[in-house]
Amino acid sequence: MHDAPTTSGTGPTGGADSGEPLSGGLKQRHLTMLGLGGVIGAGLFVGSGAGIKVAGPGIALSYLIAGALAMLIMRMLGEMSSAMPASGAFSVHAERALGRWAGFSVGWLYWFMLVVVLAVEATGAAQIANGWVPAVPQWGWVLIFMLFFTGANLAAVRNFGEFEFWFATLKVGAIVLFLVLGLLAIFGVLPSSGTYDGDPVGLAHLTGDGGFLPNGWSGVVSGVLAVVFAFGGLEVVTIAAAESDDPARAVGRAVRSAVWRILFFYVGSMLVIVTLLPWSSIEPGKSPYVAVLDRLGVPGAGQIMNVVVFVALLSALNANLYGSSRMVFSLAERGEAPRGLLKVSGGGVPRRAVLASVAFGFISVLLNLKWPDSVFLYLLNAVGAVLLFVWGLIAVSQLRLRRRLEREAPAKLTLRMWGFPWLTWVALAGMTAVIVLMLTDATARPQLLWSAGATALVLLIAGAREVRDRRRAAA
């Protein structure tokens, strides 16, 4: 193990240059599949039921709006990360664009969000595994998963890449197969089985039961609120790009290949669901994908989807452990976290950063198992809307860095944000609208307020550090 060198040079974009001491073991195929599979998780396979219940068939529009916002954010990330690849990605970009307080704030908020969500993923996967093998208690499965992925992340970055590649391949394959079966059923190609009679479904479920927008546009808006956070996770691909053989080119390719396909998977699968099933029959908390497969007579549909959700949860656990370790490592590189986290193994793995992240992840899991409806619920609420604050700083950073890059290093702009600066402002307006919606929604308001409190606390600490540093410089 050795200390990672700190980077103190200043390039055309200001701040530190990107002399990364980490391993370069990630391949283009790893990043491409990470970009595709990173946002396909349990939120889509199970959580989409809640969105359908409030929006009806209009949930397709809700996903289209939320997905468009996520695509804009991903394009901004791609532009900045291809020009300035770094293991801290948007935290480094925020520091270069707005100052140390911004890099500190967005980095620690994102790390906090990942290690808390880790607990949800580990516990959810353990519940499924416990159903398959009841002899192993739920806490035992949590321990197995955490130890396994900690070991994988400590060994080499290519282990993370390989796991995510195959996890993403399975998830993408499941979505493609679902879309194919759904379209065959819609056009009456599938033979009669289950409750499906083999006749073309037509538009009956889209136009009946209250029409395409049974709850009006307010239902679509509520649907956006229910599904927008399912797109969280796309940010990890820009963090991982710094450990690829050619970061600038790799992140550009990953972003280009992912954005349209992700939107196609989400919106396409929602259209299949609401075309084949009456939207009123969907039950929140239960997978609408299982309901469709049951209707088509697919044997063992529930267990098939359990396997897919299980893989999705483990994939998210693996990605969040990786992303949180690289984020806290980057913070340490810039003096925003303890320097002891800069120890890097001979293979280029920040092992202390991995252990620090998994340690807090273990604490979160214990809180989730012991006090799921009290202590852990407060923690979960505190990070529930943090993604919006992170996305907001990404957009503001891109607004400032794009102008600087155009002026000082235009050759680095190999991937450009669409319609700059107007679409960046549209994204910021969209995030502001979601925050206003959360304030007016009784169920989402506590989450927003707790997250705002956590953000305010981090900003207060960042401000206090700025004041301290200025006083030291003046002394």
Image (cartoon, grey):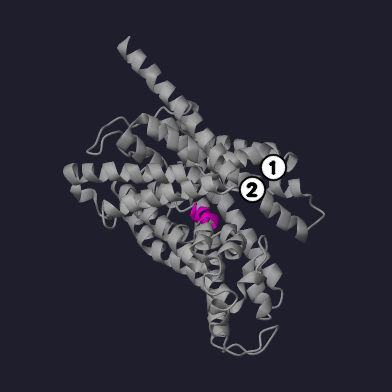
> What residue occupies the far top of the structure in this picture?
475
* Residue 134 in the image, given as x and y percentages of width and height: 81, 56
135 to the left or right of 322:
right
Q: Assign the magenta stretch its main secondary structure.
A: helix
Q: Measured along the vertical axis of the image, is residue 45 above or below residue 413?
A: below
User: How many numbered discs sit on the rendered protein?
Assistant: 2
Q: For residue 299, which quarter of the picture?
A: bottom right
Residue that mark 1 sits on:
368
In percent of the image, x 29 and y 45: which residue is there?
399
Q: Please say if 348 is above or below 336.
A: below
Considering every residue shown, the one lying at the far left of the view is 407
Q: Horizontal and vertical percent for residue 70? A: 42, 56
Q: From mark 1 to mark 2, how far is it between C-alphas?
A: 8 Å
User: In the rendered structure, which segment of residues is drawn in magenta?
Assistant: 225-232
Q: Nearer the viewer, residue 261 or 88?
A: 261
Which residue is located at x 35 percent, y 61 percent?
256
Q: Is residue 128 left or right of residue 2?
A: right
Query: Considering depth in this image, is 27 or 268 the residue closer to the camera?
Result: 268
Asked whether the residues under the numbered discs 1 and 2 touch, taking CB atoms below 8 Å apart as contact, a structural biologist would say: yes
- Side of 74 relative to 282 (left or right): left
- Residue type indicated by callout 1: Asn
